[in-house]
Amino acid sequence: MALAGILNTTLNATMRGVVFNGHPFEMAVQDLPMPVIQNATDAVVRITMSALCGSDLHTYHGVAGATPP
């Protein structure tokens, strides 16, 4: 296991993330476990900015793809 994976499991590191659970109009900011590098080809990327596409709102409104996981 990579050093990052060892640190994550020992320190119980978390991050904040916006989660859509498949129900229209329901999103939440949650504490989530930090991702763990498991393979030499893995990468963890910190997102500092993001944008929404107009089609993302179809899922949020329950028009397409809004089925519970």
Image: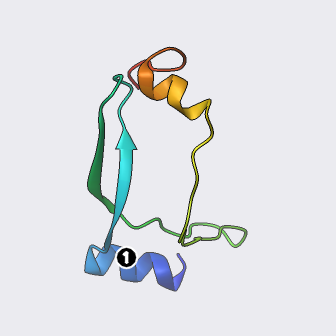
x and y percentages locating residue 44 in the rendered image = 58, 71
Which of 67 and 37 lies nearest the eye of the viewer?
67
Q: Name the quadrant of the C terminus.
A: top left
Circle 1: residue type: Asn
Residue 10, placed above or below residue 25: below
- Which residue: 54% across, 16% down? 64
Residue 55, placed above or below residue 27: above
**Residue 37, located in which quarter of the rendered image?**
bottom right
Q: From the image, tell me which residue sits under label 1.
A: 8
Q: Is the residue marked by circle 1 packed among few (<14), some (14-19), or many (20+) residues within 10 Å?
A: some
- Which residue: 62% across, 29% down? 55
- Which residue: 48% across, 68% down? 36
- Residue 47 as seen in the image, left or right of residue 42: left
x and y percentages locating residue 51 in the rendered image = 58, 53
x and y percentages locating residue 67 in the rendered image = 43, 18
- Which residue: 43% across, 22% down? 61
**Residue 13, located in which quarter of the rendered image?**
bottom left
x and y percentages locating residue 38 in the rendered image = 57, 66
